[in-house]
Amino acid sequence: MLSKRILFALSFWFVLALAVTGCAVPAAAPSGEEAAAPAGGEAAAPAGGGKLEVFSWWTSGGEAAALQALFDAYSAQYPDVEIINATVAGGGGSAARGVLQTRLAGGDVPDTWQVHPGFELIGQYVDPGYVAPVTSLYEAEGWNDVVPEALRTMMTKDGEIYQVTVGVHRGNGFWYNKQLLADNGIEVGATLSVDEFIAIADPLVAAGVTPLCVGDSGIWATAQLFENTLLGTIGAEAYNGLWDGSVRFDDPGVKQAMETYGKMLNYQNEDHSALSWDQAVKKLMEGGCAFNSMGDWAYGEFVNAGLTDNEEFGWVSHPGTAGSFMIVADGFPVGNGSANPENALNWLKVIGSKEAQEAFNPLKGSICARTDCDRAKFGVYHNWSMDSFANDALVPSVVHGSAAPADFQQALNDAVTVFVVDKNVDAFADALVAAAQSSGFGQ
């Protein structure tokens, strides 16, 4: 039943939060039978040259730098393997997933590809048989002791694990240009409510400053703006209720969130539809707007531009979401039937290591999926994020594939596309109610 799957998801967020604070997380009990070796045969496949195709949508400056850190870690151990960087531009995988599905359906299977745990991994790739189990790799590397059990559960079906997660993002960030705000006599505190944002935004508009930068040439970015606004309006408990059917999408609180989202759209840049998410972040850095609502992969863009935490840029939770952490996790599987399964298995071995995750996540903006990374190797923002992860209410993202099935995710994008134009709250709510019912979790 879906309610049980939602309970699994919530237990994932809870146990992973305990792990970040250093609390002991027991290793999963053995399944009773040794897992079948993944497509490479042995858990520690030998280096033998050849190629490795890595499929992802990490193409922006910060993303590319973080991905290169993983490539460097891999090449240091397997220098004779040629890495094929098969990236497809489009943040959130908006374009890449379609390309990947076409390739998989045609039998052109990449060696490994970027994926989110939960509904996306299991429903889109495990169930159709596109990925091979990597359970024996976890056993050989001792990862059952450092990867929280609930996270492993989100990557597991029928006792087999199918993914290595490399980082965990906070999706409900609200980034701002500190100098621009200072020039307009504005100082942001530790939290920001919707009313406080509007009280800031109106004077900015009067001063000729665009309050909010959005880059929704990929519609997912404004869908995430809605997702964050929804969380900030109804709170974590009701937000989680949307995914087990206990809260409807035509609930008064949800409609209020839609109204607020519509107001926020009035403050966005006129060229929003022409910009990608990272171009919107760049616009923020250049002083073209004051705020940007985005996950902390935006942090990687600031780092790539040479900016310093809490100096040129600042951050706060998306208005109303203080006390909540929107989870967006990234990882990789081994393609079932790919050309280079041994090299793919070694890729997972490398990216699952403490060293690789400590190199990758400071550049990407995310925090480690392991419990034993050294916090001293991370900056001010990351430590703030780790504290939020450890103490705040943890909620799954529908925009990034964890909270609901792919058909609802697409329905949300479609409904947002219409709402951005007509701002019809009733039609927006009706569309999401119908989509939830069609996906099996609506009342």
Image (cartoon, rainbow, N blue to C red):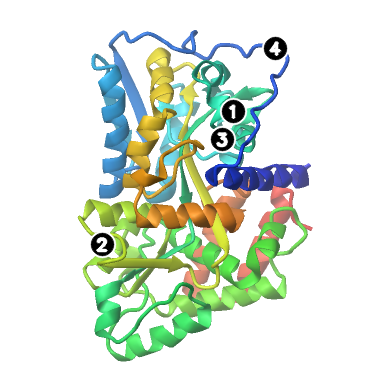
Identified at 57% across, 64% down, the residue is: 323
Q: Image check: 266 left or right of 62?
A: right
Residue 194: give x, y in percent of width and height. Answer: 52, 78
Residue receiving disc 3: 121
- Residue 11 location, quadrant: top right
Tell which circle, 4 or 3, labels the residue nearer the N-terminal end: 4
Residue 256: give x, y in percent of width and height. Answer: 63, 77
Q: Secondary structure at mark 2?
A: helix
Q: Which mark is residue 282?
A: 2
| Three-letter code, disc 1 | Val
| Three-letter code, disc 2 | Lys
Q: Secondary structure at mark 3?
A: helix
Against 82, residue 359 (above or below) is below
Tell which circle, 3 or 2, labels the residue nearer the N-terminal end: 3
- Residue 340 location, quadrant: top left
Q: CA distance from mark 3 to mark 2?
A: 31 Å
Residue receiving disc 4: 33
Q: Residues within 10 Å of mark 2 (few under 14, many from 20)?
A: some
